[in-house]
Image (cartoon, rainbow, N blue to C red):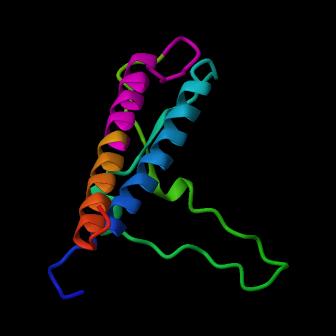
Amino acid sequence: MSDGQTDLLSLAASRLSWLDDRQRVLARNIANSDTPGFVPRDEMSFSKSLANLQVAPVQTDPRHLAGNMEIANTVAVRPRQRSIDGNAVALDDQMTKVADTETQQRLVTNLYGKYMSMYAMALGKG
């Protein structure tokens, strides 16, 4: 592939992976909505994630810890308000983000499907 071109399938897979990670973070926020002192987190924006591609840690020896990059891509969300126990999760915000993430997942999946059907048509199989 030449410079300036984007591998659409790779980009779609990266976006779906990011959306999956975001759903996991949002689910953790919602699950901890009653935990005293809990501060919600969110995934770093997708554009920043692409710009800051990181190499995952490699376990070179079975005695080494595997490593965890889960927290590296999340950022603390500045709370609008906190409850008396210090919890900063606003369920309405979290549910809005969950719905937005689901919509984005559906969009990427539909685009991927359309691309694959055009590819099959180009090969004479569609």
**Of all residues shown, which one is farthest toward the top?**
84
Percent position of residue 23, x then y: 48, 39
Q: Quadrant of the C terminus?
A: bottom left
**Of all residues shown, which one is farthest toward the left?**
4
Residue at coordinates 27% horizontally, 53% vertically from top-left?
A: 114
**Of all residues shown, which one is farthest toward the bottom?**
2
Vertical relation: 58 (above or below) 88: below
In the rendered view, does 18 fall on the left or right side of 69? Answer: left
Percent position of residue 116, x then y: 32, 61
In the rendered view, does 34 fall on the left or right side of 48? Answer: right
Q: How many marks?
A: 0
Residue at coordinates 40% horizontally, 61% vertically from top-left?
A: 13
Q: Main secondary structure of the magenta part?
A: helix
Judge by depth and name the residue closer to the eye, 90 or 14: 14
Vertical relation: 94 (above or below) 44: above
89 drawn magenta: yes
Magenta segment, which residues? 83-105
The answer to which image quadrant residue 80 occupies is top left
In the rendered view, does 115 fall on the left or right side of 95? Answer: left
Residue at coordinates 55% horizontally, 32% vertically from top-left?
A: 27
Residue at coordinates 32% horizontally, 67% vertically from top-left?
A: 125
Q: Quadrant of the N terminus?
A: bottom left
Judge by depth and name the residue closer to the eye, 42 or 122: 122
In the rendered view, does 8 fall on the left or right side of 3? Answer: right
Percent position of residue 35, x then y: 64, 23
68 drawn magenta: no
Judge by depth and name the residue closer to the eye, 79 or 3: 3
Percent position of residue 47, x then y: 27, 58
Vertical relation: 1 (above or below) 9: below
